[in-house]
Image: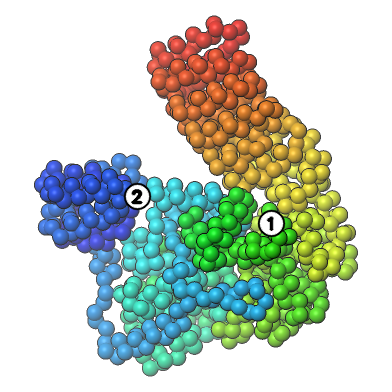
Amino acid sequence: MLDSYSDTDLEIITQFYRQRLEEAIFELVESIALALMATSSLSNEEYGLISKMSKQQRKMEATQHLLDTVAKKNGQTNRVLWETLVKMQGTKPKLKRILKEIEKKGSLLLYNARSSQMDENTSNNLKRIQKQHKLHLLSKNVTLRKDTIKGKRNSMTFCLDDQYTELILISSLRERRLVEHELLSRGKDHEEWQQRYITSDLEKIRIDQLFRSSFGQSSHSGTSVVSGVAGIGKTTMVLKMVHEWAAGRIYPQFQFVFHFTFRNLNAIKGKTSLKEIVLDSYPYLEGTIREIWMRPEYLLLVFDGLDEFQHTIDFTDRVASKATETLCSSPDFTCEVSEIVLCLVQEKLLKGCSVLITSRPTALGSLEKAKINLWAEILGFLAGQRKDYFRRFFGSENLATKVFKYVEENEILYTMCFNPSYCWITCSTLGPLFTQPGGKQPLPKTITQLFSNYVYNLLKNHQRDVEDQRMVLLRLGELAYQGVSKRVIVFNEEHFCQHQLEPSKFISGFMMEILERDDAAKYVVFTFIHLTIQEFLAALAQYLSPRHQNILELLHWAFKKDDGRFEIFIRFVVGLSASTSSRQLEEILGPLSHHTTCQVIDWLQANIQAEIKNMDKNTGKRQLLNIFHYLSESQNTALVRKTVGSVEKLNFGDTNPQNALRLNPLDCAVLSHVLQLCETMEELNLEKCYIQEEGVKRLAPAIHKCKVLRLNHNHIGDRGVSVLSAALLHEDCKTQKLDLQDNNLTAACIDDLRSAFNVNQSLTMLYLDGNKFTDQCVPGLRHLIMSCKNLELIQLWRNQFTPDGQKQLRSLRVSRAGLRVFV
């Protein structure tokens, strides 16, 4: 592989892959340096310094120093480095991926690497206009503003650097479909997933690597797509990238960057041309636009918010008509906006230019058949970033620590805070509760309670702005519901007029705390400050109507929709049936509809009973879990005991992983809440539900109530067993049959299991097949078996025992009548 590259070529490739190499080899840095010293490529002193850094846990710094040192030496040293990397790639997926790319791309790799460098052949006229263009972009993208809920349209200003969120590469279409709604994603599971895969497999992408970097496919130009749930930071990322280019810090190879939003493109009625779109935003380019078009390979066009576009773009590999071919072959010809975007992506218009599209995951389906050069997803905040956000928001270390501790201990609230927008909503809501004298207001425990509190604070701080707040919220909620049902998140004045709302009155006060006004386009448009605020108000409207509505029919229809659009809406509708969620709002809005509350509870009860009967079916498992989430929001203890309390078996697992329901920690927390309200559960089957250690933690308060507990194939590991064992020490433990097959267990968990069942003698059957037990574990396992006085069966198939180890374990069969040991 390396023989086809000269020393100079390898130096270019090293620079091209520099950042990715740092992340791929930092765990191997000392071994690599040792190998280079053995070939006299590094001196003893150079190796010693790198080794010292590595032992001091400064491995990334050591890696950077190693690559810097190699770069200063001759080409042969660099070649030895690459030869060493080939030998050491082993089980390092990031390094393997880099080496595979180098082998696969061949001469095209060098072309890509060289094309990433700055172009010097720019005319003086273009340089002058480029400078003006950059100054214009810099002036537009210096800061961000967030409004507060303090009642007087106060706002906080942030530098872009403070709000930017890291990106990591997403490697498959299936993974891009995992997150459809931010509240349905993973909380601590999301955090664990980030940390595990960023470290071991997936790779971080900087904003200067979305184009003409080693991450892309075969082409040096083309389209990159960045996805992320609402509020995760896509627009902030775009503004940051445009700002950094204008400041001269990234993408020197692009002479011009043009930034558009699909929200603004919605305002264009009829046909237009790319030239008109560009000049409408950048009129000072009128005299030079033709010269700019002449070198499309030096252009980047950014389109933010595909999910907000009101027209359909068919990105399939269809054969375009001759008329479309003609219209879209030049920036001067007029056609529909959707055709312009389509032809840019298909490289029929301005062939060689680069395009960036951002979108929520729900709108990615149309892009899956397009020719995409790079896919990326914004994952949001890790734990450290969440804490930093709370510190920045409150400006008080003490207050930030108190609020964050409360959030961290509440899985439902913590789930939300990987998302910057949710961090803001959570901080805005909880801050006043932690600083109020006497602490009169209860702290929210559910999502519905959090958003009820948020809206309550807005209403309370703006009581003088609106005469009839109930009527205004009803109309606004009806508008929100229309948007939820039709997947509309951008509203114009016509939408407001249909609901007897006057946008002209929203310049200040309550409405502008709920809505964001965007007048950058030709027509003023509005959006709710967050998708989930829209969903909450849509749900609240169901309780504000003066006439009795058939909420049963609406819930039945919405529940049957399988595209997820109503899932959070239904959670809020059910959550508002709880007096703990609605009490504060009723102080200002008056009583919520008792008729609706009764209908919601009736619907919930009927659906629990129906889905319990269907739980052995694949769709039934998901529907039942959704119902459990609704139960958790309802806080209706009597209803849980009445419906789930009589159930003997809950089955979310399956021997076929395709039929098992993958449970995240939030799901486990909800399941635990339901189980805690039951006296006994005959069987809980979570086989292949991938709950992991964090899921066991969430289930711990209720797990002792299950007589048969199937946790096989769940990657819970030794630490998960430690948590499980502590839970099974409960004085009222009913667990008789425990299945822990295929969970990567080692000797480290044996003492925990023995301690649990030495105290609690309920266990009769234990399945430990397919783990990593060896002969070293035999004494501990013998002790475990002898300690469990009522143990009748233990299975240890598919472990790593020698014949002698197996013999020692089987010999225990004679120690107690009826004891069966299979190994």
Along the line of sight, the residue nearer the viewer: 509 or 603: 509
Disc on the earlier residue, 1 or 2: 2
357 left or right of 482?
Answer: left
Residue 561, given in percent of the width and then of the height, sits at 70, 56
In the picture of the structure, the residue carrying the numbered disc 2 is 94
**Residue 155: which quarter of the image?**
bottom right
Q: Which element type, helix, strand or loop, lies under badge 2?
A: helix
**Residue 619: which quarter of the image?**
top right
- Residue farthest to the front, as pictured: 438
Residue 320 can be seen, yes or no: no
Residue 443: numbered disc: 1
**Residue 543: which quarter of the image?**
bottom right
- The residue located at (46%, 74%) in the rendering is 159
Kind of residue sitting beneath label 2: Lys
As displayed, is residue 66 above or below residue 809? below
Kind of residue sitting beneath label 1: Leu
- The residue located at (39%, 49%) in the rendering is 199
Residue 691: numbered disc: none
382 left or right of 413?
Answer: left
- Residue farthest to the bottom, as pictured: 287
